[in-house]
Image: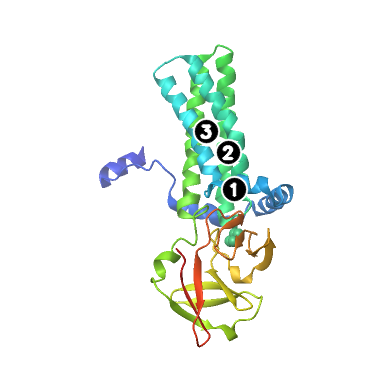
Amino acid sequence: MEETTRSRRTGRLPRMIPSPDLLDGLERSTAFDKPIGALTKTVRRKLGPGKLRDFLHGVPIGHPLHPAMAMVTFGCWLSTAVLDATKADPRAARTLITAGLGSALPTAAAGITDWSTLHREQQRVGVVHALTNAAAAALYTGSLLMRLAGRERAGRALAYAGLGAASAGGYLGGHMAYRQAAGANHAESVSHLVPLGWHDLCALKDLPNGRPVRRRLGYIDLFVLRLGDGVSVLADSCSHLAGPLHQGRVTAEDGETCVVCPWHGSVFRVADGSVVHGPATARQPAFQTRLRHDGVVQVRPAD
Ligand code: FES
């Protein structure tokens, strides 16, 4: 009430969403770090590396899977609210709630897989995001049970409450994606920072054979790997969360040379930066190389 009066006096809209300061506090809060650490370890151990984990991260589609799945769940529940508001066919509302609940499980599985490879500040917000969405799922389950028992009015009330919880969860998810850059491509800016054409990098003789090193080109750091007379060059900041690839391990996958990111284990082909294993879903920017007659390695952004 006092807020509304003050808003009228200042001409500002009353606050409908949490203050950014509140979320800053949540990011810094260490209250749940112990269980977060334990859960992170458990998820990583249970999933392990492999096709299932890559699928849940979204590697096959080149984007995180979780937000796409969340659209399905939220869309079903938002549509339920529209049907409820217009008092349309109650069977259609029940079908949509059931579809939303059915999609919530794989949505959560993809979400927790991504969550287990985030920075701690992102994970703290992620826990509250998960709890609000779990509350939404519980409210929609209650709503469905009420409707099946013939108590349509109570079912609608629980569904509206569920939509409120799901919206709060969506807001927190948006904070993680847009403010904390969880799930964003952290190497995207590279292509804007390197001018077109060939650039001198360093002398071939100054590169150790078989061990990746970091070299600077203008504003950006490059991952450089020499194998004999061949040189492979990628952007050094991992597309997942900007880990330093030059500190990673060189390995072979299907006969091709790859680098494993030291932070969360994403695997990239050094020849073209393509993703072999997640959590990264975006290709690592790659560079073409050539050797000048005086032994200087030159690079330019690959097409
Ligand atoms: S920063 Fe996470 S895998 Fe590279």
Kindly report which numbered mark, 1 or 3, lies closer to the viewer in this rendering. 1
> Please, what secondary structure does the residue beneath circle 2 have?
helix
Residue contact at pointers 2 and 1, CB within 8 angstroms: no
Based on the displayed image, in which of its 4 quarters is residue 15 positioned? top left
CA distance for labels 1 and 3:
18 Å
Amino acid type at circle 1 is His
CA distance for labels 2 and 1:
11 Å
N-term mark: 2 or 1: 1
Q: From where the camera sits, is residue 61 visible?
A: yes
Write the residue at 66% across / 51% down: 36
Q: How is the image coloured?
A: rainbow
Residue contact at pointers 2 and 3, CB within 8 angstroms: yes
Write the residue at 53% across / 19% down: 94
Looking at the rendering, in which quadrant would you find the N terminus? top left
Kindly report which numbered mark, 2 or 1, lies closer to the viewer in this rendering. 1
- Kindly identify which residue carries mark 2: 107
Front residue of 154/170: it is 170
Residue 240 appears at what percent x and percent y? Answer: 55, 58
View quadrant of ligand 1: bottom right
Front residue of 278/301: it is 301
N-term mark: 2 or 3: 3
